[in-house]
Amino acid sequence: MGKDYYKILGIDKSATQDEVKRAFRKLAHKHHPDKETGNEAKFKEINEAYQVLGKPEKRQQYDQYGTTFDQQGGFGGGMNWGDFMRQARSGGGGGVKFDFGGLDLGDIFGDMFGFGGGSRSRQQSHGEDIQIDLQISFKDSVFGIKKQVELFKTVKCEHCNGNMAEPGTPIKTCTTCKGQGQVSKVQQTMLGAFQTASVCQECNGEGKKAEKPCTKCSGQGVARKKQSLELEIPAGIEGGSAIRLTGKGNAAPYGGHPGDLYVRVHVKAESRYRRHGNDIHVKESISFVQASLGDKIDVKTLDGELSLKIPAGTQPGTRFRVRDKGVTYLNSPGRGDLYVEVEVQVPKKLSRRQKRLLQELKQED
């Protein structure tokens, strides 16, 4: 008994061809065997159904006669599942287009296998990314800073301005790809015409070519040169963070897209200040007398000195909070707080008078 292909795809007999395709695409993604939750048997079955319902002439025959297309193995012409998967995967990359008798499987499987699925867009080269390390002070990490750095990198050729042609010479349409940037190749298979499209090697996908290549860059459009860049380090950045500067990496040959620059920021250790989130912690020493009687002390901060009141009877380890004197919030307004922890210094040597006074104090206690 023949299979119910409409039921397999979960659609009505009145479904349009677009609805058939959408149903197949959804199920193909769900049951693809390369996924953890994939089901190869189910995947083969829905492909078999789509091979019939996806072609109007075969669908009409199926609706009229109920032909047992399941005997064809799902792909017709004796091609089995393994053959299909090898054919599909071997076509990866380079803008491959499948044409099985008008059924564009490349459009459906392109995102699964990682190839272009019939897209005719030109594929440009991409420049390499660069990573550098940059050390800044603790204060600069709090308030931000601009830094000038020098890099030896690939840049656009100054002689030809990146167009790859010797100045004053013409740039003509590529004769190999006729300006398309791609070359197509058609092979006859048991399924019909099998067409592939790949980037033109003659013009590297540009569709045009210099009559006389640039003598400085050999027609690549790029050259190695030392370049100075100004980096803006944002306020509040933490040590170990990376900043990505799009398009500031190595330039790409043949007019491609430049890579990115990654700046790994290292913050120099500061003995006085300790950072906790966006708060800053410092320690200040006061005398036994100041702790007992109270006083005002000057505290050195990243904003300059501030006067801090020490109440009478302050205990060792007491922390005082000073608002908005901490680290700037990254990419946000406002700052954290400053915490001043007091350490009470006990004198190691006392004069006779100091001892006498402390003895009197002890007797009163």
Image (cartoon, rainbow, N blue to C red):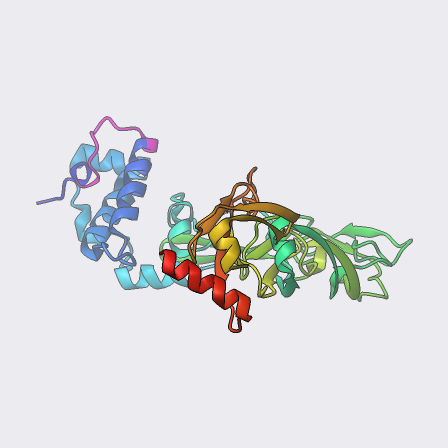
Q: Quadrant of the C terminus?
A: bottom left
- Rendered location of residue 78, percent (x, y): 26, 59
Q: Is residue 110 above or below residue 7?
A: below
Question: Which residue sits furthest right?
Answer: 168
Compared across the picture, whether 182 is left or right of 220 comes to left
- Of 22 and 15, which appears nearest the observer? 22
- Of 172 and 341, which appears nearest the observer? 341
- Rendered location of residue 357, percent (x, y): 48, 62
- Of 268 and 89, which appears nearest the observer? 268
* Residue 151 is one of the magenta-drawn residues: no
Question: Which residue sits furthest bottom?
Answer: 349
Question: Which residue sits furthest top?
Answer: 14
- Of 109 and 351, which appears nearest the observer? 351
Q: Quadrant of the N terminus?
A: top left
- Rendered location of residue 45, percent (x, y): 20, 49
* Residue 17 is one of the magenta-drawn residues: yes
- Rendered location of residue 25, percent (x, y): 32, 42
Compared across the picture, whether 268 is left or right of 42 comes to right
Q: Is residue 67 above or below residue 348?
A: above
Say which residue appears at 32% left-offset and 59% top-offset. 84
Question: Is the magenta region chiefly helix, strand or loop?
Answer: loop
Say which residue appears at 42% left-offset and 50% top-offset. 110
Compared across the picture, whether 57 is left or right of 202 comes to left
Can residue 19 be seen?
yes
Compared across the picture, whether 241 is left or right of 192 comes to right
Can residue 124 be seen?
no
Say which residue appears at 23% left-offset and 36% top-offset. 61
Write down the region rendered in magenta: 8-18
